[in-house]
Amino acid sequence: MSECEFVILGAGAIGSIVGGHLARAGHEVVMLARGQRASLLQQRGISIRGLTQFTTPVRTLSDPQQLRRAGALIVAIKTPGTDAALAALRHVQFDVALSLQNGLLKDEMLARAFGSERVLGALADTSGELQSDGAVLFTRNVGIYVGELDGRDSARAQRLAQQLQDSGVQAAASAEIVTLEWSKFCAWVGLMALSVTTRALTWRFLCDPDSALLLVRLMRETGALAARRGIALSDQAVLPSATLCRIDEQAAVALLMRIGAQYQRTAPAHRMSSLQDIEAGRPLEVNETLGYACEQARGLGLALPLMEAFYRLIAAVDRLRPQAAAPR
């Protein structure tokens, strides 16, 4: 196989949502998957239910050596093992590469693998859950944002965002992608930590005053790291990060609890991917996310005591529980 429009690395929930929508819209898509997941996609295609419902055939490969050239690489695997997965794709000529993974390390890994000139920043406020029958439950379709990491506008970011939007996945290009990535990360740190420790549906821990307070304090520590890096925050993220880091603490808790009530009304079954991972016995994205932030803070002489505590706790949980390898 020589050329295709999109290569999706990872066929879990987010990879299947993006790849399935693009394939249904008529784009030439290759899903890189392995094991039982690859076999199922080859036999049945991608099935999406929830916010929309369809099944579409999609080309699926387990061996990346069969690829030679592609327009865009979209990384949608879990962060553990990303460097090895990208190393297996270094021979492929991609026009552009972007990652929908959680955390901030993802852009650095792509730059090391393919060169910084090919990397777009990206984030997904898009959620789903891989079901036991192989279908994906599509639960949240707020937006995928893409943009140049140097802050300029570009035709390639605009084009890619429009292709996603036209396929049915809400998307937009942004010249402030670094701000948006940090704003999402600021929220995700707290959401991930509380989902793992409470094992609760998203709306439940957002509506609880104690877990909401811890989430606010984790967000503010992450916001302090962003400020030390000279990066402003935005409210255009999974949570209104800028506001939650700026207003009175009790007002921030009250705001989070109102957001939780909205989740209860609009997405009552929503579970963070980290909660899905821990219940399925999959490795947690802790070292590449919370661990990365703690390392960055130490290098800047910045103390993040609550994040450091959650990082150590969740890393211990990850090591001490039984784990099962998950297809991607």
Image (cartoon, rainbow, N blue to C red):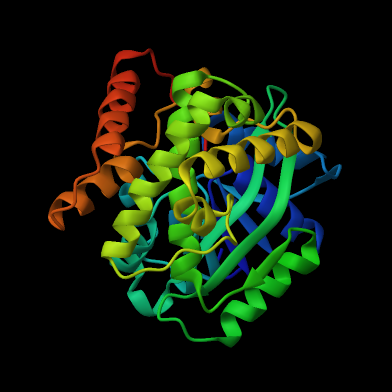
Q: Is residue 78 visible?
A: no
134 horizontally vs 96: left or right = right
Q: x%, y% of residue 33?
A: 54, 43
Give the residue at x 42% y 68%. 232
Q: Is residue 249 visible?
A: yes
Please give the count of numbered marks on the rendered protein: 0
Residue 147's place in the image compared with 186, above or below, is below
120 horizontally vs 40: left or right = left
Give the residue at x 51% y 39%. 250
Q: x%, y% of residue 28?
A: 69, 65
Please, which residue is most extreme toward the right here? 53
Q: Quadrant of residue 154?
A: bottom right
Q: Quadrant of residue 26?
A: bottom right
Q: Which one is nearer the viewer's eye here, 252 or 9?
A: 252
Give the residue at x 38% y 56%. 106
Residue 41's place in the image compared with 318, above or below, is below
118 horizontally vs 311: left or right = right
Q: Which one is nearer the viewer's eye here, 224 or 151?
A: 224
Q: Which one is nearer the viewer's eye here, 3 or 294?
A: 294
Q: x%, y% of residue 228?
A: 26, 63
Residue 194's place in the image compared with 101, above or below, is above
Quadrant for the N terminus, please.
bottom right
22 horizontally vs 7: left or right = right
Q: x%, y% of residue 69?
A: 50, 71
